[in-house]
Amino acid sequence: MNSRVVVAPLSRENIEVFANAVRTFLGISLYDRVDVLKLIEFVLPKHMDGFRYEVVPDRELGDAEATTSTTERLIRISQSC
């Protein structure tokens, strides 16, 4: 499945509000650094039924470093990342 959906960008303020709400939900202080690898590997699977991630060869993602499918609850990450 290589279809791309382009969505309207969010304002910086809206992104910050959403990110802070996620931090609060996950119990991460607003002042702590987020370990994204730990978040993807250990935290999200505990909070999202069916969440998974895959590390794939770079050529599978083209120019992207990672892709997300919200319907499949899947993050695909290029091998070189």
Image (cartoon, helix red, strand yellow):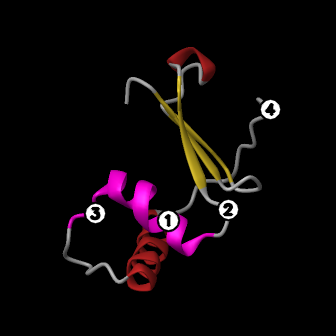
| Label disc, if present, on residue 1 of the rendered structure | 4
Q: Pick the residue in front: 19 or 38.
A: 38
The amino acid type found where label 3 is placed reads Val
The amino acid type found where label 1 is placed reads Leu
Q: Which residue is mark 2?
A: 50
The amino acid type found where label 4 is placed reads Met
The range drawn in magenta is 33-48
Q: Gap in Å between the C-alphas at discs 3 and 2?
A: 22 Å
| Label disc, if present, on residue 34 of the rendered structure | 3
Task: Identify the image quadrant of the C terminus.
Answer: top left
Q: Position of residue 1 (x, y in %)?
A: 80, 32
Horizontal side, residue 34 vs residue 41: left or right = left
Q: Position of residue 34 (x, y in %)?
A: 28, 63
Camera-nearest label, 4 or 1? 1
Q: Judging from the image, what secondary structure is the residue with disc 2 in?
A: loop
Horizontal side, residue 76 vs residue 19: left or right = right
The quarter holding residue 76 reads top right
